[in-house]
Amino acid sequence: MLKGKVAVVTGASRGIGKAIAYKLASMGADIAVIYAGNRDAAEAVAVDCENTYGVRAKAYCCDVSNFETAKETVAAVKADFGNVHILVNNAGITRDGLVATMKEEAFDAVLDTNLKGAFNMIRHCTGLFLRNREGSIVNVTSVSGLIGNAGQSNYAASKAGLVGLTKSIAKELAPRGIRCNAVAPGFIRTDMTEAQAENPLLGAIPLARMGTPEDVADAVAYLVTANYITGEVLRVDGGIAM
Ligand code: NAI
């Protein structure tokens, strides 16, 4: 289904990003595994993609919040794979805290990675998408960005920003055949939510379980291939934000 396509997945060394990399590889896409720190884990994901699904895959170290590094990384992917057709902006961090005591640095770090990082990657892939007259972007936002969450003002702001970014880019690039959508996960079992196992909000999930990275990856794969959908924000949250 995605044979001959090249997908860039950020934050793909673990968690949701890793599941997205595997899912898109299983559909035939070649995968650029973008990671921030854990080289061994990222290279293991790339090797798995190649060995299990017979696609090409390679790991690239890139701090997506850095405009120049993002530019160099997209150029390196183009040099290695020849093109980019799919971009999944999954890299994200949390620095939770109450607003009365939140450090400026915690606000900036979360906005820089989650929102500016997505902009940086989109900015540097768009030239290729325009030349191809096709492209599919999926941004990983969060239900926190849709309904807010006490103690996550920085994170929720970054994720709400991603919704605005998604819809604006969808409108801007639709005439050129480029789509931009988002998924908004709820509580997904990963390293990021390890500390949430006792969160009382879990009891409010209508489907009565945390999500899996694969639940999110399935939604991303759907949006990547849904040719008549753009500017959509698809909740993958067991119903918690309905
Ligand atoms: P995780 O912490 O397991 O993985 C995040 C990945 O992003 C890691 O591989 C990390 O190295 C990478 N990353 C962080 N900063 C980076 C940077 N500056 N440059 C490049 N890569 C960077 O988290 P998880 O749970 O897999 O989350 C993935 C995405 O899903 C994030 O955007 C997160 O905000 C979002 N999300 C997660 C939810 C959950 O319940 N786990 C719920 C809603 C959204």
Image (cartoon, rainbow, N blue to C red):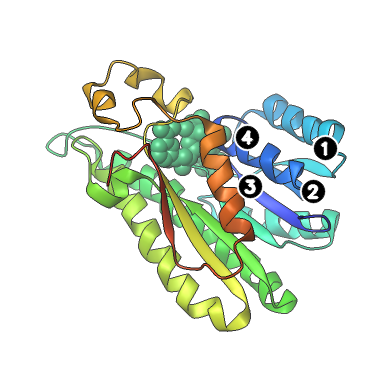
Q: Which residue is mark 2?
A: 28
- Give the amino acid at mark 4: Lys
Q: Is residue 12 visible?
A: no
What amino acid type should be assigned to the residue bearing mark 1? Tyr
Q: Residue under label 3, please give it.
A: 9
**Image quadrant of residue 16?**
top right
* Residue carrying label 1: 53
Looking at the image, tell me whether mark 1 or mark 3 is earlier in sequence order: 3
Q: Which residue is mark 4?
A: 18
Q: Amino acid at mark 2?
A: Gly
Assess whether mark 2 and mark 1 are in contact (beta carbons under 8 angstroms).
yes
x%, y% of residue 193?
40, 25
Furthest toward the top, the residue is 198
User: What residue is shown at x 49% (from left), y 61% (from top)?
Assistant: 181
Q: Residues within 10 Å of mark 1 (few under 14, many from 20)?
A: some
Distance from label 1 to label 2 (Cα)?
A: 7 Å
Q: Earlier in the sequence, mark 2 or mark 4?
A: 4
Indicate the amino acid at tag 3.
Val
Q: Residue at x 62, y 41 (%)?
A: 20
Ligand 1 within 8 Å, label 4 CB = yes
Which residue reaches farthest bottom? 175
**Quadrant in the picture for residue 81:** bottom right
Rendered location of residue 99, percent (x, y):
16, 39
In the image shown, does 117 or 225 lie closer to the viewer? 225
* The N terminus - image quarter: bottom right
CA neighbours of label 4 inside 10 A, class few (<14), some (14 to 19), many (20+): many
In three-dimensional space, the C-alpha distance between marks 3 and 4, rounded to whole angstroms, equals 8 Å
Q: Which callout, 4 or 1, points to the residue nearer the camera?
A: 1
Residue 39 in sight in this render: yes
